[in-house]
Amino acid sequence: MLDTNIKNQLTSHFASITSPVELLVALDDSKKSTELKQLADDLALLSDHFSVRENPDNTARRPSMVVSSPINNSHISFAGVPMGHEFTSLVLALLHTGGHPSKVSDIELAQIKSLSEPLHFEVYISLSCQTCPQVVQALNLMAAHNSNITATMIDGALFQEEVNERNILAVPAVYLNGQLFSQGAVGLTDILNKVDSKAAIRQAEVLNEKEIFDVLVVGGGPAGASAAIYAARKGLNTGVVAERFGGQVADTLAIENFISVKATEGPKLVAQLEEHVKEYGVDVMQNQRASALTKPDNFQVTLENGAVLKAKSLVLATGARWRSMNVPGEQQYRGHGVAYCPHCDGPLFKGKPVAVIGGGNSGIEAAIDLANIVEHVTVLEFADTLRADEVLIRKANSLNNITIVKNAQTTEVLGDGSRVTGLTYTDRVSGESKQLTVAGIFVQIGLVPNTEWLKDSDVALTRFGEIDIDNKGATSLAGVYAAGDATTTPFKQIIIAMGGGATASLGAFDYLIRHSEQDNKSEHAA
C-alpha cells in the first residue's frame, strides 16, 4: 500500500511519538476494506507504539479505521481509505494521538481542552477535494486533545447511501451531533468560535492590544504573502490579516504555469508561502474578515468581530471569489446541486448528468475533469464563441460525453425542494426557452473582487468593484496600496499577483520613508 520512500519518511516522522496508538479497523469483504487493512498493517510496522486490532463496535462504518489513544481516550475515525489529499490528515492524526506536539497556538489549545460538552463531528469529504483536509485536520486536532470530542472523516464517494440520505451535494459538509454544522471551507478558529460563544470576544480583545503596524496587509493570498515578505525584509513591523491564508489558491488542483516550478498543487504552494512569510516574523492573523477602513489618524481596519487593527500604511490584497449567476433558484440550491468547485464536489455526482456554466478556461477545464466522473457534461456558454484556450477546446470536443451549447443564457435553477433537478436557459439566437435535466450545476463564470467592505472608504473602486491602482500599486488614498485579483490589474494569475504584491509593498515602503521625512520637517519647523 505504501512505497518504500513514503515508509522511510514516515518512520522518521513517527520517531517523535511517545504514547501508544491503536488502529481499530472495521472491515467487510470489499476491495476498499482490503486496501484499508493493508494500510493499517503497513503503518503498524513503522512504529513500536502502533498496534492494529478489530474494532469491537458492530455499528461502525465499513471499511473504517479509528486512530485511538488508550491513555487519553481520544477517537479519530476515517470512514473509507484516507489516501489522496487526506493522507496527510491521517499522518497528523497518528502524530497528535501519539503525543507529538501540534502547531496550534497555546491559546487555541487551552480553548480546545476547556470544551466540556460532548461534540461528535462527522465531516463528509471527497478524496479529490483540496479544501477538505484543512477541515478534517482541524476537527481531528480537537479530538486528539479533548476526549469529549470525536471526529469522523467520511468518504462521500464510498458511502453514497449516507450522502443521499443527508442530501449532501457539496463538500466538506460537517455535522455536529447529527445536525448540519457547516459547509465549505472552515478553519479551526471558525469552528471554535461556533462551539464556544465567548471565543470571538476573547480574540477581539487580543487583537485590540496589537501595536500599530508599519505595514498591515489585508488578505493572505499570493499577493498578500508577497507583500508581507517584501515589507518584513525591509525591517518593517508587518502584519497579515486574512480570512484564510492562501485564498483561492488553496482550492486550486493543479498549477502548471508558475515559472520555475514545472507542476505543483494549490495547498502545497500555500503551505510554502505561509512558511516563507512566518520565517520573517510576520504577525499572521487568520480567520478574520475586514469590515471597514477608516483614517482618523493612522489607518484603522475594523474586523467583523469588532476588533480594530492600526497601521501606518496598508496593502489591500483581498482577492476575489466565484461570480454567481444571479438567477432564481441559485441561492436556494447552493450546496444542494449548485457548486463552484468541480474538484471538490465532482465525485458526489458520479454517474449523473451535470452542467457547467461558462466557456472560459475554468469552465472547459471543469468539464474535462468532470467527464471522467459523471455521466454527461453540458457546457452552457453565453457568447457565440468559447473563450477557453484552443488546446482545452480540442480536448473537450474529443470527449463523447461533453456537449457544448453556445448562445445559451441560463435563466433558472430547477429543483424538487431539496436538490437540483435541472435548469432552464434561453437560446439567444432563436429566443426559445429550453430545459435541461441535470443533477448538478457547476458555475464557472469569472470572479468578483472582495471589496464590498471598502465602499464607504476613500479608496476608489471601479464600476466592477475593483480597486483602482497606478503602476506602483497606489490607490486613491495616500498610504494605501493594493495588489492581486481585487485590483484593476488586467490578468488574474498567481505570478502576476505575487509581482503586484511586491510592487505594492515597495510602494508602501517608499510612502513610509517620505511620510516620515515630512513629519520630521514639520517638527523642525515647529
Image (cartoon, rainbow, N blue to C red):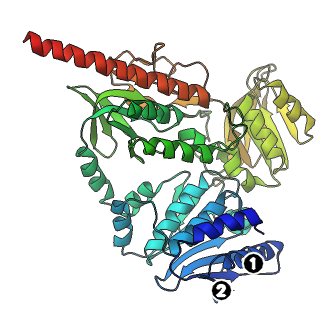
Identify residue for label 1: 37
User: For this view, does 409 lie left or right of residue 175?
Assistant: right
User: For this view, does 262 lie left or right of residue 15?
Assistant: right
User: For this view, does 51 lie left or right of residue 450?
Assistant: right
Q: Residue at x 79, y 34 (%)?
A: 379
Q: Give the image location of residue 361, x and y in percent.
A: 73, 30
**Secondary structure at numbered mark 1:** helix
Give amino acid for label 2: Asn
Q: Give the image location of residue 478, x and y in percent.
A: 32, 17
| Nearer the camera: disc 1 or disc 2 | 1
Vertical comparison of 27 with 122: above or below: below
Q: Give the image location of residue 4, x and y in percent.
A: 76, 66
Vertical comparison of 63 with 252: above or below: below
Q: Nearer the viewer, residue 226 or 178?
A: 226
Q: Is residue 437 visible?
A: no
Q: Give the image location of residue 117, x and y in percent.
A: 39, 75
Which one is earlier in the sequence, the residue at label 1 or at label 2? 1
Vertical comparison of 412 with 295: above or below: below
Identify residue for label 2: 55
Residue 450 circle label: none
Give amino acid for label 1: Lys
Q: CA distance from mark 1 to mark 2?
A: 12 Å
**Secondary structure at numbered mark 2:** loop
| Quadrant in the rendering for residue 413 | top right
